[in-house]
Image (spheres, helix red, strand yellow):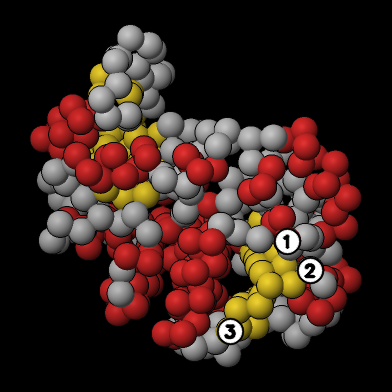
Amino acid sequence: MKHFLNTQDWSRDELDALLAQAAEFKRRPLGDQLKGRSIALVFFNPSMRTRTSFELGAFQLGGHAIVLQPGKDAWPIEFDVGTVMDGEAEEHIAEVARVLGRYVDLIGVRAFPKFRDWAEDREDKVLRAFARYSPVPVINMETITHPCQELAHVLALQERFGTADLRGRKYVLTWTYHPKPLNTAVANSALTIATRMGMDVTLLCPTPEYVLDERYMDWAAQNVAESGGSLTVSHDIEGAYRDADVVYAKSWGALPYFGRWEEEKPLRDRFRHFIVDEAKMALTRDGVFSHCLPLRRNVKATDAVMDSPNCIAIEEAENRLHVQKAIMAALVRQ
């Protein structure tokens, strides 16, 4: 049984097939691939695009989605093995996943890091516990990676450039300022999929402290070796933007300061100028801009950039619906 936890777990041929199916669903939205099937969507964190697109996607393919929020409309869950459950949690993941798997055909999980200890959070315990105990396929709806967003992003790029082959494109993944420390999930995923597609990738961040976890840097290096392209880490804004075909923006926390926000904040506050603006985009080769959303306007990117015809953030957000339908359809066919 195959889960959808990371795109790195899927072959390039399998990913290309998902993208092709997503494009077909975009042309013809309705189908019966999930007729008589159901998915439990388990949200440990808030959502707008993810919940809407998964619920609608299941409906459009004839299936049914059930939304659960542990600690709100479902019991709090314990994930540690061997723990004495005398705290807040009422039931263990060993029962939750197996029971849900008796009811539904798929389980989606959205669970952000706790932002206390990266050594613990990088283990992705919630997602992996669901995958360990579930008798049905599990879909990552965003934890420390966001593989559904990856495919939506690539589909939007393929549409904009008019080709499925993105090799040779200069791709800039740029850190941007945000007044809060954010999850590295989208940055991890953007780095993963851009290198997987053979693009020439530049990771632009203010200082070495903002370089991503070695797991994802290693994945990117592996992808470059297999798919072509290149990987560069840069702290030079002008050099990174120059002649770029794609600029993808995201804020993320510096891992050495993970869980120590008051220590990171003075460092972060020095780099508000990493905002994506017209002057930076003018350095590109008429490049496209995107972001996973939500985006704080005039903090991460200016109004002019967001409202430019070169911004494909809305197309990317729409594509979440189509790629997730492709993922669900593929998993129930196993």
Give me the C-alpha separation between circle 2 and circle 3.
Answer: 17 Å
Residue under the point 54% across and 61% down: 214
Neighbour tally class for label 3: few under 14, some 14-19, many 20 plus, Cα within 10 Å:
many
* Residues tagged 2 and 3 counted as in contact (Cβ below 8 A): no
Q: What residue does disc 2 label? A: 235
Identify the element where label 2 is drawn: loop
- For badge 3, the amino acid type reads Ser
Give me the C-alpha separation between circle 3 and circle 1.
Answer: 19 Å
Image quadrant where residue 39 sits: top left
**Picture coordinates of residue 76 (x, y %)?**
35, 19
Nearer-N-terminus badge (3/1): 1
Identify the element where label 3 is drawn: strand
Q: What residue does disc 3 label? A: 230
Residue under the point 46% across and 85% down: 225
**Picture coordinates of residue 104 (x, y %)?**
17, 39
Q: What residue does disc 1 label? A: 208
* Residues tagged 3 and 1 counted as in contact (Cβ below 8 A): no
Image quadrant where residue 276 sits: bottom right
**Picture coordinates of residue 16 (x, y %)?**
34, 77
Nearer-N-terminus badge (1/2): 1
